[in-house]
Amino acid sequence: MSATARVSADGKGKPVLEVRDIAKSFGGVHAVRGVSFDVFEGEILGLIGPNGSGKSTLFNCILGQLTPTRGTVSVDGQAVTGLRPSELNHKGISRTFQLLQVFPQLTVHENLILAGQEHRGTMFSRLFMPGDAGLGGEADRMINFFRLGHLRDEKAGGLSYGQQKLLDAAMAFMAGPRLVLLDEPAGGVNLTMLGALKERLQAVNRETGATFVVIEHNMEFVMSLCTRIIVLAEGQIIAEGPPETIRSNPDVIEAYLGH
């Protein structure tokens, strides 16, 4: 299926992210083949597919890590195709990576302040505002929201992997971004911390209306978190819909069993 979704799962909302005919080739290898979709305001969209399906390449084309061979990306109707990640940050687009991006020698609180500065800090704030650039209170609110209060002054490198994943997610939401793209948030996280991560992501969506897209291999995690799912295989969309529809889709089952 290659048709672009025009309405959200519940028929409401407006597109925050519009991806149109994105393709990316590396020499003769076509990693992404003309993918189009929308992400609607307040939605949690899952992007899944077997290994080699083009998920990460598509993500990186959207986020400025790669330049697409063709196609456009728009946020709130404004073209952002080819903008650098730092420029996208200032437009309210945040992301996490498969590999953690926390700073191990900094405390949890300091990591969040640094994330806030990256997303919206200005030269004026860094030169003339307090050492926390006025972000200390917001960092504490985010720490409490993600239930990391008991770790506030601990160095990130001393946290468990699951706790670092929670911190990584908190950093992505630190500046109240318009759109967050989460790359493998469940990867390597034990079941207890995975439940906490899912609950907090659902809470930030419910309480702030945050819009985000999740790339994930953990099928149970993405099926229970996301309201709509897009499935890629061989660089193309093969299915789109609510989790209960995707679970039983024969094309999806074949794509996974074939890998």
Image (spheres, helix red, strand yellow):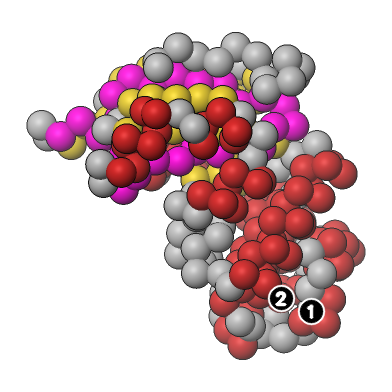
User: How far apart are labels 1 and 2 at the CA level?
Assistant: 5 Å
Residue 123 shows in the view: no
**In the rendered image, which quarter contains the N terminus?**
top left
- Residue 99 location, quadrant: bottom left
**SS at mark 1?**
loop
The picture places residue 4, in percent across and down from the top left corner, at 49, 14
Residue 16 in the figure: left or right of residue 187? right
**What secondary structure is the magenta-colored segment mainly?**
strand
Secondary structure at badge 2 equals helix
Residue drawn at x 63%, y 83% is 159
- Category of crowding for the residue at label 2, using alpha-carbon neighbours closer than 10 angstroms: few (below 14), some (14–19), many (at least 20): many
Q: Above or below — where is 152 with respect to 222?
A: below
Q: Disc 1 marks which residue? A: 152
Residue span colored magenta: 29-55
Mark 2 is on which residue type? Answer: Val
195 part of magenta stretch: no
Indicate the position of residue 140 as horizontal and vertical percent values: 85, 67
Give residue 173's position: percent from left, percent from top. 71, 52
Magenta-drawn stretch contains 35? yes
Q: How many marks?
A: 2
Question: Which residue is located at x 77 percent, y 43 percent?
Answer: 205
63 lies above or below 241: below
Left or right: where 30 falls relative to 123: left
Q: Looking at the picture, which amino acid does disc 1 mark?
A: Arg
Residue 145 in view here: yes
**Which class describes the residues within 10 Å of circle 1: few (<14), some (14-19), or many (20+)?**
some
Disc number for residue 32: none
Q: Which residue is mark 2?
A: 108
